[in-house]
Image: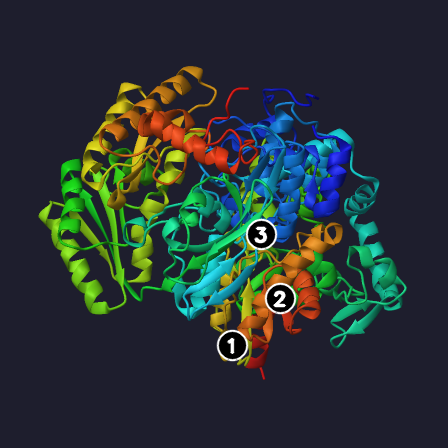
């Protein structure tokens, strides 16, 4: 029996720094099991250790000294979670499981250190230039490794890479977005002015829009311009840190947060917009909680948290969206990304935008807010479970008869692209903002 | 701890991936949804995928005198699935196939691990429902709810689980498989085996298949609430509705403590000066009938000085339901331990029981709120306490003893729907007497003479 933590948390520590801080949150759990109804991992695996109440019980056992934090089973269980926060929407006592999971993973990393592979990946994130270079290298080499598909918008691994990567889902059927040779932030100027603009907005691109979906990023900028907004896209911004945070690397994410805050402060903008629920959630919640005991950056994080909006909320709640008139004759279904809906509380706004597009029919799927199984890197580390979850999503999409799946988060776009090809009717997968941008473009003929 | 040879044999029977022996896995099967009961890790968790596997495991375990704890989703509220004597937890989470939906006979055949809500989703396209609706419909399994004979909000009009199980396949303690009942409405062949196993809490046999009865989904419904300034008015309204020959689908009550806590929690504009709130829903197959019944209910509410609210749309219905849905979460938010009882009295004693619960709460200086199913007399006195406060926990235990005593005095029962498990075992004699306990024991010993099925629940294991 190993006691790994002190009973009482020390002052000025957040749950990122000390597991005991999370004790009160753990105590809220009644073990009622309502989380079983919505947990995608439990739905796929059907064993107790997959579901939230059990992860809470294990965290309690670790705090009580009944289980060792560095027990490999604890480690395995802690990482078998998408951090999708679905359980939080169904919890009668409102346990904030997102915090519990991050606290547990951070404690594991403090105890064990980051595994070398993750360390390698994350160390590149701290140095944007090096990361840019490796992503560009990836872009130029991908034609050797991947076959181009869907008019160049998707790629599949070529053998022998497909063979080697089969275990983690890089088999020949895998569909991935094409890595772009020029990143979004290289493609656009730092400031995109709009004649007579009175509002200045800073666009936090996040890595996925920057590297994988620069077209969607440009569409977002175009939409703001069409609504008479000046857009700042600071080149010094880096990753939001969520991919690092969910792996427990608190030091790195704090460094990323402070840098991002400095960079956006320098823009002098009134608002910050995102096109990704994970990035927006980081600015709205995680930075505030991570920097809570930082006297300088804590208040700055609070300031930006109150001024960060998903692009759909900004367009429909902060300004009033100029109704588009360009016709798009498509049947579209909308997938609620977990972090967009469950972290940022954004669900009706993207639908309002889709409804505003002439010709477009929105057909809801069953359980639109059920996780797609991406979970950032979860899909790489737990490919079988992620596939089971993704197959259900693809089947729900198929039943709508829609020709297009729209979504507000690039990580989901990647997972959905793969899953509609693997299990579904190969629908087009697009960011909802791209449909709005297309409608505006069609106005111009 | 079972030795490696035994684990290897279980793996040979069930397959390696269906046998869990890790500490984390075993820890996560050491509890269910019940507060304030002991926890215990099993030696091993086995997830069978068919009946033959269940039989093989039972035979194997019997030879070696290893206890077996059958388990559905582990959402029960009586400690019914805690593996008190370790051994094997037999989890049915993977036996979750719907085998047959038969609209012509109004039946469905399911494996025990099918979630109640999943069955309802599957039969909905046929215009049918499976009516039993415990609060856990979205998570609880058909096998678990049959073993616990779960009730729910629709009990008054639609009955409880035992009214909807027409046939079963059960693996007995000797490993034999028995099938009885089926798709016929009438069946008097042999004893009524169904009633033996439904509500047996896994102590007599292991349910491996169920034939469930379905009914046409009601097409129309009306929902209303009545707020009352005295408990007597609310109690008279409940009696008045029944006297007016209306059987509502839902007839729920909340006391003042619950109303105020819900209002603090959810801010939905509840009348915090009211002593009781009734939520009433009538349903049926014709608009005229539902209209007539709802008018009768409204008249009764007004006659008893109730402040009436009615829902015209689904959205308004949802608003009226918000209060009831938030009752448990709101109360639970007050402290770290939720003691949720289900003592049940004849409908005519509802008011007396509400008053008694309130007085017991005051007497022991506890935070106690009561809500529940007024229509069928099944109340949920809920005590919120701090598990780290020994004095408060001791007062809570005394209060619970007294709640059971009062319920029995009113001609009621210890448990309306949660079951006995280990939580209420010691009170059984108070309701059944020695002859009742003897009957219980003789049934147990004729079916499971070695006390290997869910030992430590319902029937005390004899001291050796």
Closer to the camera in the image, B289 or A375: B289
Q: Residues under labels 2 and 1: Cα distance? A: 21 Å
SS under mark 3? helix
Residue furthest to the left in view is: B303
Is the residue B253 above or below the residue B387 in the image? below
Q: Chain of mark 1?
A: A
Which residue is at 57% across, 65% downward?
A: A224
For label 3, the residue is A339
Residue B257: x and y in percent read: 28, 33
Are the residues flagged by discs 3 and 1 from a single subunit?
yes
For label 1, the residue is A360
Callout 2 touching callout 1 (CB < 8 Å): no
Quarter of the rendering containing residue A286: top right
Are the residues flagged by discs 2 and 3 from a single subunit?
yes
Callout 3 touching callout 1 (CB < 8 Å): no
Which residue is at 84% across, 55% downward?
A: A133
Crowding at dot 3, Cα within 10 Å, few <14 / some 14-19 / many 20+, comes out as many
SS under mark 2? helix
């Amino acid at each position: 029996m190993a006691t790994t933590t002190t009973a009482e948390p020390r002052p000025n520590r957040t749950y990122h720094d000390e597991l005991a801080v999370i004790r009160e949150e753990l105590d809220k759990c009644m073990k009622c099991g309502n989380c079983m109804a919505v947990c995608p991992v439990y739905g796929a695996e059907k064993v107790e250790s997959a579901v939230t109440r059990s992860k809470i019980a294990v965290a309690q056992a670790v705090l009580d000294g009944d289980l060792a934090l560095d027990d490999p089973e604890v480690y395995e269980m802690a990482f078998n979670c998408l951090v999708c926060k679905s359980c939080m929407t169904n919890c009668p006592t409102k346990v904030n499981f997102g915090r519990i999971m991050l606290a547990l993973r951070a404690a594991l990393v403090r105890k064990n250190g980051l595994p070398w592979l993750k360390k390698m990946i994350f160390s590149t994130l701290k140095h944007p230039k090096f990361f840019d270079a490796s992503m560009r290298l990836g872009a130029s080499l991908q034609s050797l490794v991947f076959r181009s598909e869907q008019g160049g918008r998707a790629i599949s691994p070529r053998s022998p890479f497909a063979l080697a990567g089969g275990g983690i889902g890089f088999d020949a059927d895998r569909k991935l977005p094409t890595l772009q040779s020029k990143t979004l932030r290289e493609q656009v100027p730092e400031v995109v002015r709009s004649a007579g603009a009175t509002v200045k907005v800073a666009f936090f691109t996040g890595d996925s829009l920057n590297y994988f979906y620069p077209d969607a990023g440009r569409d977002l900028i175009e939409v703001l311009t069409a609504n008479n907004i000046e857009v700042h896209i600071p080149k010094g911004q880096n990753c939001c840190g969520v991919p690092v945070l969910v792996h427990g690397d608190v030091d790195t994410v704090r460094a990323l947060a402070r840098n991002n805050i400095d960079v956006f402060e320098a823009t002098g903008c009134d608002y910050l917009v995102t096109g990704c629920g994970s990035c927006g959630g980081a600015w709205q919640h995680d930075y505030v909680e991570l920097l809570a005991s930082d006297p300088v950056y804590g208040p700055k994080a609070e300031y930006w948290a109150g001024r960060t909006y998903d692009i759909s909320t900004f367009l429909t709640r902060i300004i009033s969206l100029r109704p588009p008139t360009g016709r798009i004759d498509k049947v579209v279904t909308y997938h609620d990304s977990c972090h967009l809906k469950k972290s940022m509380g954004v669900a009706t706004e993207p639908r309002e935008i889709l409804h505003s597009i002439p010709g477009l029919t929105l057909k809801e799927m069953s359980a639109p807010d059920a996780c797609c199984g991406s979970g950032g890197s979860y899909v790489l580390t737990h490919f079988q479970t992620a596939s089971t979850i993704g197959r259900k999503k693809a089947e729900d999409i198929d039943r709508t008869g829609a020709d297009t799946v729209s979504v507000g988060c690039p990580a989901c776009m990647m997972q959905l692209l793969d899953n509609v090809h693997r299990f579904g009717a190969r629908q087009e997968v697009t960011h909802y903002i791209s449909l709005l941008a297309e409608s505006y473009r069609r106005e111009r003929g | 701890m079972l030795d490696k040879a035994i684990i290897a044999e279980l793996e040979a029977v069930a397959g390696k991936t269906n046998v869990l022996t890790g500490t984390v896995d075993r820890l996560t099967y050491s509890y269910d949804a019940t507060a304030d009961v002991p926890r215990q890790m099993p030696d091993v968790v086995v997830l069978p995928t068919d009946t033959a596997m269940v039989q093989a495991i039972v035979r194997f375990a019997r030879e070696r005198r290893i206890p077996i704890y059958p388990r559905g989703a582990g959402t029960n509220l009586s400690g019914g699935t805690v593996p008190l004597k370790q051994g094997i937890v037999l989890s049915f989470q993977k036996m979750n196939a719907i085998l047959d939906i038969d609209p012509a006979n109004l039946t469905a055949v399911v494996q025990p691990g099918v979630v109640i809500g999943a069955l309802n989703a599957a039969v909905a396209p046929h215009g049918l429902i499976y009516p039993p609706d415990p609060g856990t419909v979205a998570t609880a399994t058909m096998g678990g709810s049959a073993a616990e004979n779960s009730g729910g909000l629709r009990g008054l009009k639609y009955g409880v689980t035992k009214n909807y199980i027409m046939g079963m396949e059960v693996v007995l303690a000797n490993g034999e498989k028995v099938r009885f009942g089926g798709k016929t409405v009438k069946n008097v062949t042999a004893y009524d085996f169904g009633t033996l196993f439904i509500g047996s809490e896994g102590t007599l046999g292991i349910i491996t298949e169920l034939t469930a009865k379905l009914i046409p989904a009601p097409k129309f419904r009306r929902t209303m609430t009545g707020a009352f300034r005295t408990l007597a008015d609310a109690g008279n309204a409940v009696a008045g509705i029944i006297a007016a020959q209306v059987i509502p689908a839902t007839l729920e009550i909340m006391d003042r403590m619950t109303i105020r806590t819900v209002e603090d929690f959810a801010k939905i504009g509840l009348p915090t000066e009211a002593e009781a709130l009734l939520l009433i829903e009538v349903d049926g197959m014709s608009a005229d009938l539902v209209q007539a019944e709802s008018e009768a209910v409204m008249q009764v509410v007004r006659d008893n000085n109730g402040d009436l609210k009615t829902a015209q749309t689904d959205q308004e219905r949802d608003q009226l339901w918000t209060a009831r849905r938030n009752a448990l979460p709101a109360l639970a938010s007050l402290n770290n331990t939720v003691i949720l009882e289900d003592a049940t009295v004849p409908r005519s004693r509802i008011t007396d029981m509400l008053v008694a619960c309130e007085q017991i709460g005051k007497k022991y200086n506890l935070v106690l709120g009561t809500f529940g199913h007024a229509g069928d007399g099944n109340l949920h006195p809920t005590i919120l306490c701090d598990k780290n406060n020994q004095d408060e926990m001791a007062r809570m235990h005394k209060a619970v003893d007294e709640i059971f005593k009062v319920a029995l005095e009113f001609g009621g029962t210890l448990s309306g729907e949660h079951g006995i498990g280990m939580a209420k075992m010691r009170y059984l004699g108070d309701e059944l007497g020695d002859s009742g306990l003897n009957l219980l024991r003789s049934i147990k010993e004729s079916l499971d003479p070695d006390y290997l099925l869910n030992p430590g629940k319902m029937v005390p294991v004899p001291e050796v």
